[in-house]
Image: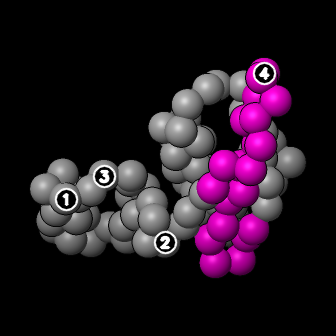
């Protein structure tokens, strides 16, 4: 089972250790995928998302930089499932 995380420092080490124990592949925000705020119009945030094989812009109505990170982790999880033929259409991201 893949692991997607935005953890850093000690928390990341705990998660990485558990992933190693369970032989799970780990995807870390800022290392394996990233995002960057593009625009805020007062109602929604647009951000760019990038990982190997996918670069695109998305918009969310949840505000705050941490919400971009949260959305990015959800997109990464969906992308992992999609590439493993788990039937999550790209259009639903």
Which of pointers 1 and 2 indicates the residue nearer the eye?
A: 1
Q: For marks 2 and 4, give the CA distance.
A: 29 Å
Which residue is the site of mark 1? Answer: 9
- Magenta stretch, main secondary structure, is strand
Which residue is the site of mark 3? Answer: 7
Compared with 50, 63 (above or below) is above
Q: What is the secondary structure assignment of the residue under circle 3?
A: loop
In contact (CB < 8 Å): disc 2 and disc 4: no
Residue 2 seen by the camera: no
Q: Residue furthest bottom?
A: 52
Q: For marks 4 and 1, give the CA distance.
A: 33 Å
Q: Is residue 37 left or right of residue 69?
A: right
Residue 66: x %, y % from top left: 48, 37
The residue at 79%/54% (across/down) is 57
Q: Which residues are magenta?
A: 36-55
The residue at 52%/45% (across/down) is 69
In contact (CB < 8 Å): disc 4 and disc 1: no
**Which image quadrant: the N terminus?**
bottom left
Q: Residue furthest right?
A: 91
Which residue is the site of mark 4? Answer: 43
Q: What is the secondary structure assignment of the residue under circle 2?
A: loop
Compared with 31, 35 (above or below) is above
Number of other residues with Cα within 10 Å of mark 1, as a class: few under 14, some 14 to 19, many 20 or more = few
Q: Which mark is residue 32?
A: 2
Number of other residues with Cα within 10 Å of mark 2, as a class: few under 14, some 14 to 19, many 20 or more = few
Pick the residue in front: 66 or 2. 66
């Amino acid at each position: 089972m893949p692991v997607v995380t935005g953890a850093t420092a000690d928390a990341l080490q705990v998660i990485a250790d558990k992933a190693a124990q369970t032989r799970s592949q780990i995807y870390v925000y800022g290392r394996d995928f990233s995002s960057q705020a593009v625009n805020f119009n007062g109602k929604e945030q647009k951000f760019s998302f990038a990982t190997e094989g996918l670069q695109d812009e998305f918009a969310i109505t949840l505000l705050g930089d941490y919400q971009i990170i949260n959305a990015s982790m959800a997109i990464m999880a969906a992308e992992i499932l999609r590439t493993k033929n788990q039937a999550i259409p790209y259009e639903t991201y």
